[in-house]
Image (cartoon, grey):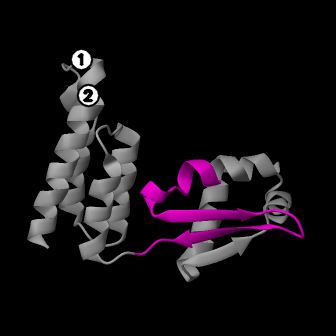
Amino acid sequence: MNLSNAIASMISEMLEEKNEIEIRRNILAQDLGCVPSQINYVLASRFTPERGYLVESRRGGGGFIKITRIVYDKDTLIPRIISSVGEMLDTDTAHAHTMNLLYQGVISEPQAKLILSAVSEAPYRNLPVQIRDMVRADIFKQMLLAVSRDC
């Protein structure tokens, strides 16, 4: 397991116990034998709002990082994601949103597989690069609307 995966795994395990944790970046880095910027990288890339997390950082006086797992009810999460998508959506962000919906129990595994297939790069390879993310955003939002009607 690479270092980024180990850091993410450790933080995820802490969040399994409760939806909000506070960590001291320097202490966690020391425990894992890495530089504090590696912790920052993992937080910025894996604990994003699209994946269902809120990260706050406090500096000075023994500062800390607070990570909160954002939990929404089914009626709130889909409209919130739809409104956050905007006019363009890349594959990675669509994947993160979909996995968050699956994790929170808003969609089923078969629904997640269907959505992930529709937002992957393959269906868009014959489209001009300039419009791929626009079309993906429209399709993703329509799929979420369809799923929300089934809930």
**Residue 44 among magenta residues:** yes
Q: Please, what is the three-letter code of the amino acid marked with disc 2?
A: Arg
Instruction: Examine the rendered structure and indicate whether residue 32 appears above or below residue 92.
Output: below
Give neighbour class at mark 1: few <14, some 14-19, many 20+ (Cα, 10 Å): few
Give 31 or 89, whichever is nearer the viewer: 89
Instruction: Examine the rendered structure and indicate whether residue 2 appears above or below residue 9.
Output: above
Q: CA distance from mark 1 to mark 2?
A: 7 Å
The residue positioned 55% from the left and 57% from the top of the image is 47
Q: Quadrant where the C terminus lies?
A: bottom left
Give 53 or 107, whichever is nearer the viewer: 53
Residue 66 vs residue 84: left or right? right
- What x and y, as percent, mark residue 87? 28, 39
> Could one spot residue 1 in this view of the protein?
no
The residue positioned 63% from the left and 66% from the top of the image is 11
Instruction: Examine the rendered structure and indicate whether residue 124 appears above or below residue 68.
Output: above
Can you tell which mark lies on residue 132? 2
Give 134 or 42, whichever is nearer the viewer: 134
- What x and y, as percent, mark residue 83? 30, 55
Residue 50 vs residue 143: left or right? right
Residue 21 vs residue 137: left or right? right
Which of the 4 image quarters holds residue 128? Answer: top left
What are the residue bounds of the magenta stretch?
Answer: 43-71
Mark 1: secondary structure: loop
- What x and y, as percent, mark residue 49? 48, 58
**Residue 58 among magenta residues:** yes
The answer to whether the residues at label 1 and label 2 have Cβ atoms under 8 Å apart is yes
- What x and y, as percent, mark residue 84? 35, 53
Residue at the outermost right position: 61
Dot 1 corresponds to which residue?
128
> Could one spot residue 80 in this view of the protein?
yes
The residue positioned 56% from the left and 82% from the top of the image is 18
